[in-house]
């Protein structure tokens, strides 16, 4: 199964439902789509094998676990070799970093972090930005409110 070209309406419905709640029982999915549970199960397995479903995970509310500050960081790097860029990618994968994007445009990386205090962010920024020879400069943006955060993909 390649990208989206081979997804039929049943596959799209399965993906949409599982993105809402990946614990939806097979019988509910099968009733909703008028398919057998075995058919739905086979389709899910094919979506997983093709890498279309890459993980089944719990989405945790950062505020509920004490990570009430969301930080967006724009990182600008010195001109670096591919090995330096790979090293940066690895250094930007710590537990406080929720998302990391290697991007085109003015910035080189965009990171999203969740922290409990600004002191925690200060320590992280010293460790991964200030003490990194490949980081030219970085800009910190503190989110006032989370308006929308989702993992849903349009199918």
Image: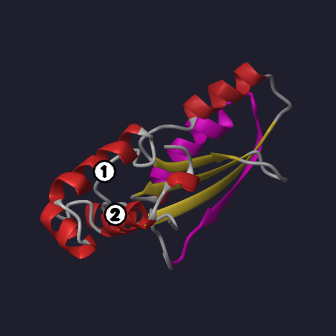
In the rendering, at what x and y percent does residue 117 appear?
43, 59
Disc 2 secondary structure class: helix
Which residues make up the magenta segment? 119-145
CB under 8 Å between callouts 2 and 1?
A: yes
Q: How many marks?
A: 2
Residue that badge 2 annotates: 14
Label 2 packing within 10 angstroms: few (<14), some (14-19), many (20+): many
Residue 5's place in the image compared with 54, above or below, is below
- Check the image and report above or below for 72 versus 98: below
SS at badge 1: helix
Residue 38: percent from left, percent from top? 18, 52
Q: Quadrant of residue 17?
A: bottom left
**Mark 2 or 1 closer to N-term?**
2
User: Could you say where residue 50 lies in the image, as x and y percent from the top left?
Assistant: 44, 40
What residue is rendered at 63% in x and 25% in y?
87
> Measuring 51% from the left and 37% from the top, which residue is drawn there?
93
- Which corner quadrant of the image does residue 92 belong to? top right
Q: Which mark is residue 44?
A: 1
Left or right: residue 50 compared with residue 83: left
Instruction: Tell whether 34 sits left or right of 85.
Output: left
Locate residue 81: give its quadrant: top right
């Amino acid at each position: 199964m390649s990208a989206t070209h081979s997804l039929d309406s049943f596959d799209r419905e399965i993906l949409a439902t599982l993105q809402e709640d990946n614990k939806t029982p097979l019988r509910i999915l099968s009733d909703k789509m008028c398919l057998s549970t075995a058919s739905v199960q086979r389709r899910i397995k094919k979506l997983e094998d093709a890498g279309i479903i890459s993980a089944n995970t719990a989405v945790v509310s950062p505020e509920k676990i004490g990570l009430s500050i969301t930080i967006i960081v724009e990182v600008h790097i010195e001109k670096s070799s591919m090995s330096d860029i790979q090293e940066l990618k690895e250094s930007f994968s710590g537990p406080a970093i929720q998302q990391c994007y290697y991007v085109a445009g003015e910035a080189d990386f965009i990171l999203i972090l969740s922290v409990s205090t600004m002191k925690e962010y200060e320590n992280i920024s010293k460790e991964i930005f200030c003490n990194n020879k490949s980081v030219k400069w970085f800009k910190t943006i503190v989110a006032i409110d989370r308006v929308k955060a989702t993992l849903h993909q349009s199918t």
